[in-house]
Image (tube, rainbow, N blue to C red):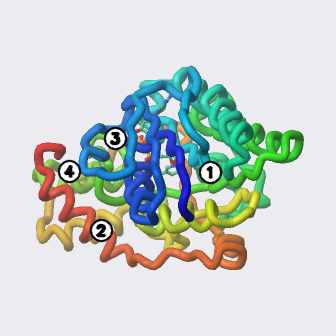
Amino acid sequence: MPGHAVVTGGAGFVGSHLCDRLLARGMRVTCVDNLSTGRADNIAHLRGDFRFVEADVARGLDITGHVDLVLHLASPASPRDYERLPVETLQVGAAGTNHALDLAQANGARFVLASTSEVYGDPREHPQRETYWGNVNPVGPRSVYDEAKRYAEALTAAYRRARGVNTGIARIFNTYGPRMRADDGRAIPTFIRQVLTGEPVTIAGEGAQTRSLCYVDDTVDGLLALADSDLPGPVNLGNPHELRIRDLVGEIQRLAGTSVPVRGIPAPVDDPQRRCPDIAVAQRELGWQPRVELHEGLRRTLEWFATHVSLV
Ligand code: NAD
């Protein structure tokens, strides 16, 4: 797809991989990011038709030139980040999404919202299908993120219905890979940092809670497939391979060739016990499914962290 793409949150973990891929497709890319949880380093290598605008999307989006595609990823995404930035998280989900949708409407552009499996809260249905409405505590510590994304989805659906904007909603499940921050508190970078520095690995509770983990290249493939389609969604993007946290730690230790002690810590409030996507819609409507096996994705991620030790 030639043309001009605007990626909000493009200096973050997923957004920077998305910018790489859009540029490789020959698109002009404008990345708008306030660097609140992202890093300028993530986009420092980008050359060619790439422009970085340092700005807060919740305050507005001032883009010059015609825009063909708006990919709205700006938002703190890890529990540690959104608990540090609670009001900002709600603002970017609400006003930020509003501005991104207005930009798409003004340009007749395709709009893709990076929503999240967190809209399902602590789910009562397994695996989660897009038709499940979720089980979210509206005033718990995670609500700033969950409800921001639920509002962002509602706003996106309203712009489609009432204003004819060509929108798509992706519900992204846990994604991992190079360029995550070692200190963002999410499971994989935390375990990798602990294993690489020889600290004890900390597991919430017994480590029997499950996660399904998708390698970033797969998630980006899914976002691009959604961008290329006219599908409104919501569509789950994630890897249905469900594994227990303690088995994940075992796999990382095996790959790193080390064995460090494991220490139990209390589970965070409202921490979901199980999360697993049903990806039948993405398979059927987008011809998408994850391709990178956990073993291979973890190997690439470990290798990246090991060569970026300053970040560990
Ligand atoms: P990230 O924190 O690495 O990236 C988010 C980016 O948004 C950062 O660069 C940050 O600086 C930027 N940002 C935040 N608030 C902003 C604002 N007001 N204005 C401009 N920029 C702002 O997180 P990520 O993991 O890359 O997540 C990207 C998107 O994907 C988020 O919307 C997140 O909710 C969604 N998502 C990610 C995952 C995952 O597992 N990584 C899962 C579900 C959904």
Amino acid at dot 1: Asp
- Disc nearest the viewer among 4 and 1: 1
Note whether 13 is above or below 144 in the view shown: below
Q: Nearer the viewer, residue 50 or 149?
A: 50
* Front residue (pair 310, 261): 310
Question: Distance between the Cα atoms at labels 3 and 1?
Answer: 32 Å
For disc 2, the marked residue is: 298
Q: Earlier in the sequence, mark 3 or mark 1?
A: 1
CB-based contact (under 8 Å), mark 3 and mark 1: no
Q: What's the amino acid at mark 3?
A: Asp
Of the residues under marks 2 and 4, which one precedes in the sequence?
Answer: 4
Q: Amino acid at mark 2?
A: Leu
Where is residue 15? Give x, y as percent. Answer: 44, 49
The residue wearing badge 1 is: 68
Q: Residues within 10 Å of mark 2 (few under 14, many from 20)?
A: many
Q: Residues within 10 Å of mark 1 (few under 14, many from 20)?
A: many
The yes-or-no answer for disc 1 within 8 Å of ligand 1 is no
Q: Earlier in the sequence, mark 1 or mark 2?
A: 1
Q: Which residue is mark 4?
A: 193
Alpha carbon distance from label 4 to label 1: 39 Å
Residue 195 placement, left or right of 111: left
- Numbered disc in front, either 3 or 1: 1
Residue topped by disc 3: 184
Q: Residue at x 25, y 50 (%)?
A: 45
Residue 98, position as x, y percentages in the image: 68, 31
Q: Residue at x 29, y 57 (%)?
A: 178
Within the image, what quadrant is residue 284 found in? bottom right
Residue at the spot x=73%, y=46% of the render?
108
- The answer to whether the residues at label 1 and label 2 have Cβ atoms under 8 Å apart is no
Q: Earlier in the sequence, mark 2 or mark 3?
A: 3
Looking at the image, which is closer to me, 267 or 84?
Answer: 84
